[in-house]
Image (spheres, grey):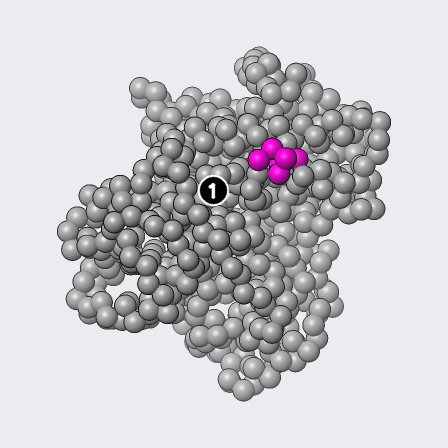
């Protein structure tokens, strides 16, 4: 931990007359998987999680982490300097932050790294406390570290229409059909831009995106970027990224659609007050996959299944391997099976480390021995720039009854959520509820199911929409050809954890919704207790195993 950085931030507070400042994990494009060297929160805390921000004050440093990162944060940060605020599943980061901030507090926020939606809600909460917000256009942590940050040369390529299904021009015409005449959409989501253009890059870790912004109107699409782009289509023009701000400012007396969750408060404040601002739903276009994309994902998951065979064979050999050995093996096997990049850093956890939901530091010293659980959560990108995401939990040698009980509880949750008969009125919330209720009935509350049941999967491995969780945002009807994960899990600190994840897609069959799977990797037979299953669950478990890719 850089103590000089702490002193630098204290001087920043004093010089700018603020009581504290938010230190973000993201960058100016609000990405989830930011490079660590560009991650201000990481520089301050050493915490490597993909999400989680800091409130820095002269007296205290608060690190806010959701349930996926409670254990990891405890293990990585210096708790003599940092207080880890562990946000429970039923509480938002905004609420947790507001509870820590006292009355009459002057809070600094980096405007380029804070969404308009977040800013509006936080400002309202702080006003009730007579507290205020001051916006800064640059990040003091990144300014302090700028000499160590390298520029990335993005190699942007075009995805074949046989994979993405529609040309970029056809996507523009579809957007125009729904938006009507005289519309303007400001796009700051990198995933949305990658979708619209059919362009991808694997140069930014764990993503298929490239830095850009866009303005869409009925006349065409301006793409603002400093990357060299291949030809997109006749309706597209490329401009330098620096031109984006002036072009936003020039828009006047129009109806402008934006996504408040993806647009920074900095960009929002560039918009002329004469414009009428409306909420954009452009993200829905990429969440509904074309049949060509579905077919491509079937191929991708088939290759990912083949990659996982290496782990299965290693685990069932007589050789004792470390977590790190398994980590290296899955990375190599993915590449050997055609992966062009990883969609996230693989989680490879053994023994009690399996309770750390997003365990990120596979150890060369932690050997996986007889009786140890091994959890592998992995994903990759192939030529279409769509992510895969799969999790399996295995056992080395023989399992205890406790391990079987925990595993079978999670397996039952998956089977019930996956094979349930859904109507066209069903929501993603319903899927979560089925999985959560099954676990609650199957195992004691010593084990925690401390995350949502799933998330959207697409150009990013965590795509929104949809969400499969107990939150209100999941209470939307299941839409045909949306792709999402079903990944129930149970965890007990000091003992371990079980998670089983399959990425799936929804189809309509008459008045019903059917959930279809991409992966066909079997479940760990040595961890299944059939006596815990009813006849329905046994039937579908046997059906899954019989059609699996490993016999």
Relative placement, left or right, of 34 versus 421 is right
Image coordinates of residue 502 in percent, x first then y, are 55, 31
Q: Quadrant of the N terminus?
A: bottom right
* Residue picked out by circle 1: 385
Toward the viewer: 472 or 392? 392
Q: Residue at x 41, y 23 (%)?
A: 514
Main SS type for the magenta part?
helix
Image coordinates of residue 254 in percent, x first then y, are 18, 62
Residue 520 seen anywhere in this rendered image of the structure: yes
Label 1: few (<14), some (14–19) or many (≥20) C-alpha neighbours in 10 Å: many
Q: Is residue 359 magenta?
A: no
Image coordinates of residue 263 in percent, x first then y, are 38, 60
Residue 180 higher or lower than 409, as above or below: below
Residue 466 sits in quarter: top left
**Magenta region:** 333-338
- Callout 1: SS: loop
Q: Is residue 335 magenta?
A: yes
Toward the viewer: 19 or 224? 224
Q: Residue furthest bottom?
A: 15
Q: Residue at x 38, y 45 (%)?
A: 198
Residue 74 sits in quarter: bottom right
Residue 92 seen anywhere in this rendered image of the structure: no
Q: Residue at x 44, y 75 (%)?
A: 137
Q: Residue furthest left?
A: 181
Residue 7 higher or lower than 109, as above or below: below
Relative placement, left or right, of 498 versus 174 is right
Q: Quadrant of the C terminus?
A: top right
Image coordinates of residue 6 in percent, x first then y, are 65, 76
Relative placement, left or right, of 382 versus 410 is left
Q: Residue at x 62, y 28 (%)?
A: 306
């Amino acid at each position: 931990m850089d103590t000089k950085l702490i002193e630098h931030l204290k001087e920043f507070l004093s010089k700018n007359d603020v009581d504290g400042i938010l230190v973000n994990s993201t960058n100016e494009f609000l990405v989830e998987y930011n490079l660590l060297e560009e991650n201000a929160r990481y520089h301050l805390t050493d915490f490597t999680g993909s999400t989680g921000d800091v409130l820095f004050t002269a007296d205290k440093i608060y690190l806010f982490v959701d349930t996926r990162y409670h254990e990891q944060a405890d293990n990585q940060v210096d708790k003599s300097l940092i207080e880890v605020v562990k946000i429970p599943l039923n509480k938002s980061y905004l609420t947790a932050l507001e509870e820590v901030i006292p009355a009459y507090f002057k809070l600094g926020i980096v405007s380029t790294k804070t969404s308009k939606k977040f800013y509006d809600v936080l400002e309202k909460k702080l006003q009730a406390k007579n507290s205020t917000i001051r916006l800064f256009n640059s990040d003091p942590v990144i300014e302090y570290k700028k000499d160590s940050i390298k520029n990335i040369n993005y190699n942007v390529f075009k995805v074949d229409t046989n994979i993405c299904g529609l040309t970029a021009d056809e996507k523009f015409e579809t957007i125009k059909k729904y938006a009507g005449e005289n519309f303007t959409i400001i796009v700051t989501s990198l995933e949305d831009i990658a979708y619209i253009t059919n362009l991808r890059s694997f140069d930014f870790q764990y993503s298929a995106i490239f830095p850009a912004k866009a303005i869409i109107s009925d006349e065409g699409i301006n793409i603002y970027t400093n990357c060299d782009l291949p030809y997109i289509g006749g309706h597209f023009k490329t401009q330098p990224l620096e031109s984006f701000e002036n072009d936003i400012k020039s828009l006047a007396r129009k109806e402008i659609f934006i996504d408040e969750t993806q647009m920074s408060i900095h960009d929002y404040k560039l918009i002329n007050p004469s414009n009428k601002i409306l909420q954009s739903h452009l993200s829905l276009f990429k969440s509904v996959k074309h049949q060509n994309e579905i077919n491509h994902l079937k191929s991708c998951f088939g290759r990912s299944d083949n990659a996982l065979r290496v782990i299965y064979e290693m685990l069932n050999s007589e050789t004792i391997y470390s977590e790190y050995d398994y980590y290296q093996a899955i990375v190599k096997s993915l590449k050997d099976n055609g992966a062009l990049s990883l969609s996230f850093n693989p989680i490879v956890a053994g023994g009690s480390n399996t309770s750390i939901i997003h365990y990120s530091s596979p150890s060369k010293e932690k050997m996986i021995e007889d009786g140890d659980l091994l959890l592998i959560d992995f994903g990759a990108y192939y030529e279409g720039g769509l992510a895969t995401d799969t999790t399996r939990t295995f056992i080395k040698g023989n399992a205890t009854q406790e391990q079987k009980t925990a595993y079978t509880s999670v397996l039952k949750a998956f089977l019930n959520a996956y094979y349930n008969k859904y109507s066209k009125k069903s929501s993603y919330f319903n899927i979560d509820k089925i999985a959560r209720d099954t676990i609650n009935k199957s195992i004691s509350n010593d084990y925690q199911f401390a995350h949502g049941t799933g998330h959207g999967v697409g150009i990013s491995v965590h795509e929104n929409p949809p969400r499969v969780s107990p939150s209100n945002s999941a209470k939307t009807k299941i839409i045909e050809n949306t792709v999402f994960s079903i990944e129930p899990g149970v965890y007990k600190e000091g003992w371990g954890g079980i998670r089983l994840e399959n990425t799936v897609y929804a189809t309509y069959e008459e008045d019903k919704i059917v959930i279809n799977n991409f992966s066909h990797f079997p479940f760990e037979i040595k961890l299944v207790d059939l006596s815990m299953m009813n006849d329905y669950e046994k039937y579908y478990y046997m059906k899954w195993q019989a059609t699996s890719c490993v016999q």
